Image: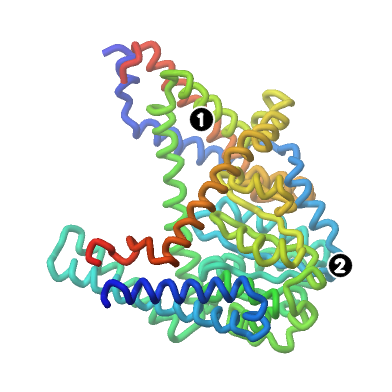
């Protein structure tokens, strides 16, 4: 059997082994690739940079554990930047698992900033999840406490928390920026209920696959900015001057991209040399 | 009665919700908030129905010793175990949080990570240039891969501009067309449901 014939009938497990090797090597020794910030990521950074100390930022977490590897670094980068600006951060979630993700990421970011580590209820709060999340989001534009039944993610009362007293309504008067971190269509209610009627600038942090879906909203001005995938997160980290997880991720994914391109080229070469037969 | 009652109920309920969203009097009288509470309640009912349905399906599978019935036991134990746990403590408590971080997290990450293996296999066998259309597909895939991985700029400094143009012009145009088409389709379906013309969601074969 010739080499071409062997490659034509290549067992897919060899390809899988290649993926394993590339991702393990890329994770242990990630190549240093700092991407040049795209205009959309720079817009997201500038929006956060414009939030004054004590300004309100509403962050809506839509993604689940499946997208955690891609979006957690991005969320951490944005939260870290906002915390460095002294913004007051209100987190809400679209599902029970997203509320736990919000808690995990924000808690880890808060450890770097004493005002946040010891300032729960003043500098940040996790409102958690409510059934019919779109209804909760809409109700928050009339009153955040009532929309979340006056309790936070852990069941503590919102009454007496200064952040909720000072930022009682999800509107432009109280919030400078709203973010959706999204792997599906969670950004849409943010546009419907918060961005368009309340005039709060809405930015989205999305998985790479979702970025094309967001383009019409970005072009129409309904979204103020988009951070796309691991690359967008790495760009944001570079802008914020805090290269962390996303820089490792983008390096590893670059190796994987090269591997997939090589596999595509090999598949075509084999098909061509083998007379187009599979 | 069996045929018409669900249709009338659907039309009345749907029309009522639409009215509370469109007219200012609904907001002024607080009717829209009542509707919101009903929607929240419907979520709870739907969850309960799902819980009961899942239990029945898997109990039957266990009872009949269907193939892979052991997994049904795992599912029921996990579902009732976790739900029972959350009756006594919040999701933020150490045990539910540990399960979330150390069981669900790796499971979901593994499921998502498997995509990379399938993509590679597909890249070898499916991304082959057979005609002009498949060549365009291959080039688009390569541009997207290099663009998303930030390698493109290393190869050619103008790469980011190319990707930005692709996103701003063909991608935006294409997705706009898809989204407008889907919205018009959804609107037409909603109107048909409200008017009782669309009955497939009620199991119209029996009606």
Is the N terminus of chain B in the top left, top right, bottom left or bottom right quadrant? bottom left
State the residue at coordinates (71%, 45%): A219
Residue A133 image-quadrant placement? bottom right
Label 1 sits on a secondary structure element that is helix
Q: Which mark is residue A102?
A: none
Q: Is residue B30 above or below residue A19?
A: below
Q: Name the subunit of mark 1.
A: A
Q: Chain of mark 2?
A: A
Q: Residue at x 52, y 60 (%)?
A: A64
Residue position for label 1 = A259
Q: Picture coordinates of residue B178 (x, y %)?
A: 54, 44
Residue bearing the label numbered 2: A53
Residue A132 or A237: which is nearer the viewer? A132
Closer to the camera in the image, A256 or A55: A55
Q: From the viewer's perspective, is B113 left or right of B70? A: right
Residue B2 locus on image (x, y percent): 26, 75
Q: Considering the numbered disc 2 on the image, is that residue within a helix, a strand or a loop?
A: loop
């Amino acid at each position: 059997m010739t080499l071409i014939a062997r490659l034509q009938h290549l067992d897919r497990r060899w390809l899988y082994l290649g993926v394993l090797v590339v991702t393990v090597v890329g994770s242990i020794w990630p190549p240093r690739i700092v991407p040049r910030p795209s205009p959309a990521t720079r817009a997201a950074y500038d929006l956060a940079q414009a939030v004054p100390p004590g300004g309100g930022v509403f962050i809506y977490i839509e993604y689940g554990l499946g997208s955690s590897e891609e979006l957690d670094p991005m969320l951490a980068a944005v939260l870290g930047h906002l915390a460095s600006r002294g913004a007051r951060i209100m987190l809400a979630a679209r599902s029970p698992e997203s509320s736990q993700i919000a808690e995990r990421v924000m808690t880890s970011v808060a450890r770097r900033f004493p005002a946040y580590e010891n300032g729960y209820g003043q500098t940040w709060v996790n409102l958690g999840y409510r059934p019919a999340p779109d209804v909760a989001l809409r109700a928050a534009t009339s009153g955040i406490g009532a929309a979340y039944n006056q309790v936070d993610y852990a069941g503590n009362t919102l009454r007496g928390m200064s952040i909720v007293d000072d930022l009682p309504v999800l509107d432009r008067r109280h919030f400078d920026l709203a973010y959706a971190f999204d792997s599906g269509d969670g950004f849409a209610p943010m546009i419907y209920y918060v961005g368009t009627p309340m005039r709060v600038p809405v930015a989205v942090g999305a998985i790479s696959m979702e970025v094309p879906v967001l383009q019409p909203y970005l072009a129409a001005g309904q979204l103020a900015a988009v951070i796309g995938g691991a690359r967008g997160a790495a760009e944001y980290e570079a802008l914020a001057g805090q290269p962390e997880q996303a820089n490792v991720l983008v390096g590893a994914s670059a190796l994987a991209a090269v591997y997939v391109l090589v596999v595509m080229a090999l598949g075509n070469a084999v098909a061509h040399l083998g007379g187009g037969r599979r | 009665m069996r045929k018409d009652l669900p249709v009338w109920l659907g039309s009345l309920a749907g029309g009522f919700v639409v009215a509370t969203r469109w007219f200012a009097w609904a907001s002024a009288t607080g009717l829209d908030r009542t509707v919101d509470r009903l929607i929240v309640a419907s979520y709870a009912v739907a969850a309960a129905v799902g819980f009961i349905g899942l239990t029945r399906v898997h109990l039957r599978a266990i009872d009949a010793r269907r193939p892979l019935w052991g997994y049904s036991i795992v599912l029921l134990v996990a579902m009732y175990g976790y739900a029972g746990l959350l009756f006594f403590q919040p999701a933020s408590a150490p045990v539910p949080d540990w399960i979330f971080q150390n069981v669900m997290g790796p499971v979901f990450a593994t499921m998502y990570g498997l995509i990379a293996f399938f993509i590679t296999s597909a890249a070898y066998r499916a991304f082959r240039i057979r005609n002009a259309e498949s060549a365009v597909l291959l080039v688009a895939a390569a541009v997207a891969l290099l663009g998303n991985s930030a390698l493109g700029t290393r190869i050619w400094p103008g790469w980011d501009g190319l990707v930005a143009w692709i996103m701003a012009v063909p991608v935006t145009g294409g997705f706009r067309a898809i989204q407008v088409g889907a919205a018009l389709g959804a609107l037409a379906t909603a109107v048909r449901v409200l008017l009782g013309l669309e009955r497939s969601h009620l199991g119209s074969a029996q009606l």
